[in-house]
Amino acid sequence: MNNKGLLIVLSGFSGAGKGTVVKRMMELHDEYALSISATTRSPREGEQDGREYFFKTVDEFKQMIQNQELIEYAQYVSNYYGTPKAYVQNQLEAGKNVILEIEIQGALKIKEMFPETVLMFIIPPTAKELENRLRGRGTEDDATVRARLKRAIEESQGVEDYDYIVMNDEVDCCVERIHNIVTAEKCKASNNYQTINNIREELKIFSEGE
Ligand code: 5GP
């Protein structure tokens, strides 16, 4: 099987539980690495610089763009978010499956640049459940919650460009679905031509004998 890591994009409605799913994925499987994004939004309570995000000023963020340190970046509800390049490259080379938890504009840019990327869209079981989760989080004011719900409607319109829709009804089930998809994707013929060629070359040598 192909030893190079797979690039995985997880998107989904804000409040669909992506963060919890990713955290659980890291606990259960050590062949995954989570990319930490840079953002200009302020830290929420409990968030730490370098753990949830690299928190940047707008000027610092623009400097990162200028230095070509980001694979992609996008604006979301008036803040910038971007994926640092070096970490993703290093982890893929080390054979890790790298998860990018990013929104749709960034997801589509990544797919265009790296077509073998697997785009997954995480959905809640119902719309009501999504609203409850967003309000229950208690970290956003009413206007922000509304902005996110509105944005969720817009995001669902791009969903046909994703490869998989994965329901997060229960965290461990959702993690298992994602892991199963990744396992299947890694076995895809188009991801394994190099392996087949290596085996062919060796077989040629063996079959020719001494
Ligand atoms: P939040 O502020 O709730 O942490 O994130 C808001 C949105 O930004 C989420 O949909 C999240 O997936 C997305 N996001 C986080 N990091 C990145 C990134 O590096 N690039 C892009 N394009 N979106 C991101």
Image (tube, helix red, strand yellow):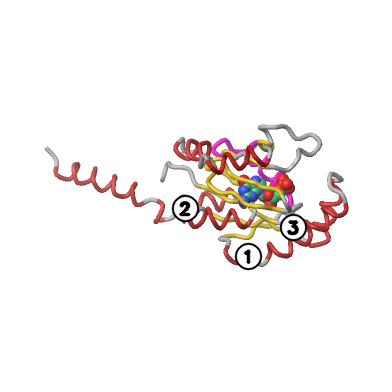
At 48% from the left and 36% from the top, the residue drawn is: 90
**Is tag 3's residue or tag 2's residue first in the polypeptide sequence?**
2
Under mark 2, the amino acid is Phe
Q: Which residues are magenta?
A: 16-32
Residue 24 part of the magenta-drawn span: yes
The disc at residue 158 is 1
Judged left or right of residue 196, residue 38 is right
Q: CA distance from mark 1 to mark 2?
A: 18 Å
Under mark 1, the amino acid is Gly
Identify the residue at the far left of this view.
210
Mark 3 or 1: in front is 1
Q: Which residue is mark 3?
A: 124
At 63% from the left and 60% from the top, the residue drawn is: 165
On whether ligand 1 comes within 8 Å of the CB at mark 3, the answer is: no
Q: Position of residue 3 (x, y in %)?
A: 42, 41
Q: Which residue is mark 2?
A: 114
**Is tag 1's residue or tag 2's residue first in the polypeptide sequence?**
2
Can residue 166 be seen at all in this image of the molecule?
yes
The quadrant of the rendering that contains the N terminus is top left
**Is tag 3's residue or tag 1's residue first in the polypeptide sequence?**
3
At 29% from the left and 45% from the top, the residue drawn is: 198
Judged left or right of residue 22, residue 188 is left
